[in-house]
Structure formats: C-alpha cells, structure tokens
Image (tube, rainbow, N blue to C red):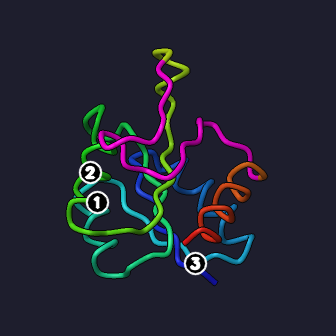
Amino acid sequence: MSLIAIIDDDPDIIDATSLVLMANGFEVITANNPGDGLKIIQEQKPALVILDVMMQEPDDGFFLAQKLRREGVTTPILMYTSVSKALGFQFGKSDMVPVDDFVEKPVSADVLIAKVNKLLNKS
C-alpha cells in the first residue's frame, strides 16, 4: 500500500492519523517539525504528505509546502488546519499555499480516508 508522511508537531494528531491510516492499509512515516519532515520526504518519497499549517511557527506548513514545490516535489499535499475555525480564514489552492487539499482539524476518520484516497487516485 502507499506510504504517507505525516508532519505535525502534535503527537496526538500524529498518533490518531497514523492509526486511521494504518487501519486502512497505508504505511506511515512521521515527523514533528518541518526540517525532519523535509528530510523524510526527500529520503523516502512518500505517495502523499499530510502537513500541519502551524507547528513551531504559525506558518511552518506553508513554508514547507512552498519549499517542496520550489524543489520540484509534485507529491500531493493534504494540509491540516485549524486556522479557519480560530481566525475565520478560508484557504484555497494558490501559489502562496501550493497544496492539493485542506482538511479542518479535528477530522473524522471517514473524511480523512476519503480525502487521502482522492489525492492518491489523482497522482
């Protein structure tokens, strides 16, 4: 099955997401910061990246997504966000936010798997 990278600084989110993905037959690698996330993406070439917007800095996820795209990484990126609930922002795909889809945290297992399958089927 497909390898999915989860990059999030919240260990509970990493654990919950990993459990859902593994229960659905996916392999999972994780990182809890953008630097380690970049390293696992470059080394292990996952089929999909699940990336949190806010880690040590409020925009770490945006910067990592931009860096990946600048480096030619075309791997689909699903971005976790809680920003829209907290601040009322709405995100859409753009050059500033070069990701393939967004999901609001907390996310149900059914929604997560549907989005993951959709993105994997596109690539």
Identify the residue under disc 3: 27
- When the figure is inspected, residue 46 is found, relative to residue 33, above or below; the finding is below
**Amino acid beneath label 3:** Glu
Q: CA distance from mark 2 to mark 3?
A: 25 Å
Instruction: Using residue 116 as the reference point, say whether residue 59 is left or right of it.
Output: left
- When the figure is inspected, residue 7 is found, relative to residue 120, above or below; the finding is above
Quarter in which the C terminus is drawn = bottom right
In the image, what residue occupies the spot 59% across and 36% down?
A: 105
Q: State yes or no: discs 1 and 2 in contact (Cβ < 8 Å).
A: yes
**Amino acid beneath label 2:** Gln
In the image, what residue occupies the spot 28% across and 60% down?
A: 69
Residue 69 — which label?
Answer: 1
Identify the residue under disc 2: 66
Q: Which residues are magenta?
A: 89-109
The question of residue 93 being in magenta is answered with yes
**Residue 39 pos. (x, y %):** 25, 70
Camera-side residue: 38 or 119?
119
